[in-house]
Amino acid sequence: METVYLETTFISYLVALPSRDLIVAAHQQVTNDWWANRKIKYECYISEIVVDEASSGDENEIKKRLAIIDELMLLDLTEEANTLTKAILNSGVIPQKAVRDAAHIAVATVHEANYLLTWNCKHIANAHILKKIGKICAASDFEMPIVCTPENLMEDG
């Protein structure tokens, strides 16, 4: 069974109240459809980074996010993941302030996830950034997972 690392934005879109923004609302619907219909085809993982991010903000939303992630398997933040995170940040491809975004990619990569599922298209699901991060991962003898949004992982190829 293939593996999917679920980044925090996926969890947030899954449990959030429907947005008035039509694009965000569509993303929320795709996320819910993926969860309901596709999740069973994958082993889904998160990391402590997701737990930390999901634990901040509105108390009611925190409870909903934590209820979802409580049923998911947790990947360790290994020394290899920390080293890869630093390499990504040191390259300047992702800004230092987005350390958690670099860490999501590093954890999923080190643990050999097949996919990293996210709605973060600024620093994670960004083709220009991923091309550069893929080279950093390869230089460290890792293969970066396929990084995509839930709508990219809806159909079997």
Image (tube, helix red, strand yellow):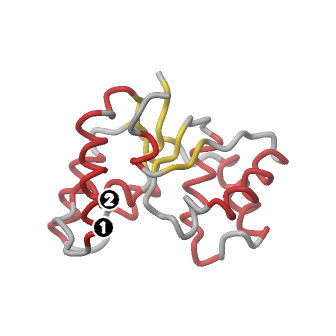
Q: Residues within 10 Å of mark 2 (few under 14, many from 20)?
A: many
The residue nearer to you, when weighing 102 against 29, is: 29
Find residue 24 and name its label. Answer: 1
Amino acid at circle 2: His
Amino acid at circle 1: Val
Q: Toward which corner of the image does residue 95 lie, by quadrant?
A: bottom right
Q: Where is residue 29 in the image (x, y as percent from the top left)?
A: 24, 54
Residue sitting at x 43%, y 60%: 119
Left or right, 45 with respect to 65, comes to: right
Q: Toward which corner of the image does residue 142 lie, by quadrant?
A: top right
Left or right, 128 with respect to 15, comes to: right
Q: Mark 2 points at which residue?
A: 27
Circle 1 — which element?
A: helix
Circle 2 — which element?
A: helix
Residue sitting at x 76%, y 59%: 132
Find residue 133 and name its label. Answer: none
Q: Residues within 10 Å of mark 1 (few under 14, many from 20)?
A: some
Q: Position of residue 135 (x, y in %)?
A: 80, 52
Q: How many labels does the image show?
A: 2
Residue sitting at x 44%, y 54%: 7
How far apart are the two marked residues, 1 and 2, measured between alpha carbons? 5 Å
The answer to whether the residue labelled 1 contacts the one labelled 2, judged by CB atoms less than 8 Å apart, is yes
Q: In the image as oriented, which residue stretches furthest toward the right?
A: 139
